[in-house]
Amino acid sequence: MTIQWFPGHMAKARREVTEKLKLVDIIFELVDARIPYSSRNPMIDEIIQHKPRLVLLNKADMADKEVTREWIAYFAEKGIKALAINSQAGEGMKNIVQASNEILKEKFDRLKAKGVKPRAIRAMIVGIPNAGKSTLINRLAKKNIARTGNTPGVTKAQQWIKVGKEMELLDTPGILWPKFEDQEVGMKLAITGAIKDTLLNLQDLTVYSLRFLEKAYPERLQERYKLNEIPEDIVALFDHIGTLRGCLMGGGMVDYDKVAELVIREIRSEKFGPLSLERPKDIPIPMQNNS
């Protein structure tokens, strides 16, 4: 399954990010805590270069806490501060301002020494569609300023937003790369809902998802679908789930499309519990060092 998706407004967003860099002190790079590598835009390092950044692992409540700790340690090794947050519930919001102050302390100390009056931190939020930027902005601003939605690509234009007296945020549209060189990245983005389902073959995605669960969370897969052991044959696994859950056509035949929809829906609605779809040791390309 080849996934390619790069609407024109995203190319424009990349240009806007580059142009506005000089206006901000720090970049907030928002990623999905379940897929911190796959939900990063590979062009981000190139675009922001040595601008200070804070990585925000959003939707941390949906991710495996142990794996999230591994990611925070991984980013720290690269000289990048990372925080686990849940913008939907407002968890970790205070830590963002505090961490930003720590990262920018030297810069503001230098400005103070030159006689420059203290001012609010200026930050720019970047991330791919559906990472939760609008929800995060609304949480930080404590009011509904940014439009939110469950479908990718809701945010379309830039705007400045005040966060108390301490911070000003520059929101940007989500940007995604023009081609998924690694199809696994595309699969992981699809599982978490970052890509529109209309672009996908759900059966292919379900095969990938079930094999992932078999490898990383076999007990949860067995418990969810009442399996004594997980069949090696993927068709047998589809048949078992379809029969168990009543995903049937006329004549008692299993409806594989319905099975696919069921499995993906149950993963997304956390019926398997919090899942992390990748660990630092599994990623093919190490992140650029920021120190």
Image (cartoon, rainbow, N blue to C red):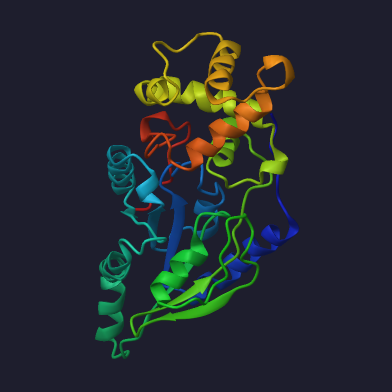
Query: In the displayed structure, would residue 266 be above or below residue 234?
Result: below
Query: In the displayed structure, would residue 132 be above or below residue 166?
Result: above
Residue pictured at 54% horizontal, 72% vertical: 146
Where is residue 137? Give x, y as percent: 46, 70
Quarter of the picture containing the N terminus is: top right
Horizontal side, residue 156 vs residue 56: left or right: right
Query: In the displayed structure, would residue 24 be above or below residue 185?
Result: below
Seen from this angle, which residue lies furthest front?
251
Query: In the displayed structure, would residue 147 be above or below residue 237?
Result: below
Observer-nearest residue: 46 or 251? Answer: 251
Observer-nearest residue: 123 or 253? Answer: 253
Do we see residue 182 in this rendering? Answer: no
Tally the numbered discs: 0
Seen from this angle, which residue lies furthest top?
232
Residue pictured at 26% horizontal, 72% vertical: 105
| Residue 278: quadrant of the picture | top left
Where is residue 62? Give x, y as percent: 39, 45
Residue pictured at 67% horizontal, 58% vertical: 10
Residue pictured at 60% horizontal, 70% vertical: 19
Do we see residue 216 in this rendering? Answer: yes
Observer-nearest residue: 24 or 200? Answer: 200
Observer-nearest residue: 219 or 201? Answer: 219
Where is residue 30? Give x, y as percent: 45, 57
Horizontal side, residue 226 vs residue 189: left or right: left
Where is residue 17? Give x, y as percent: 58, 66
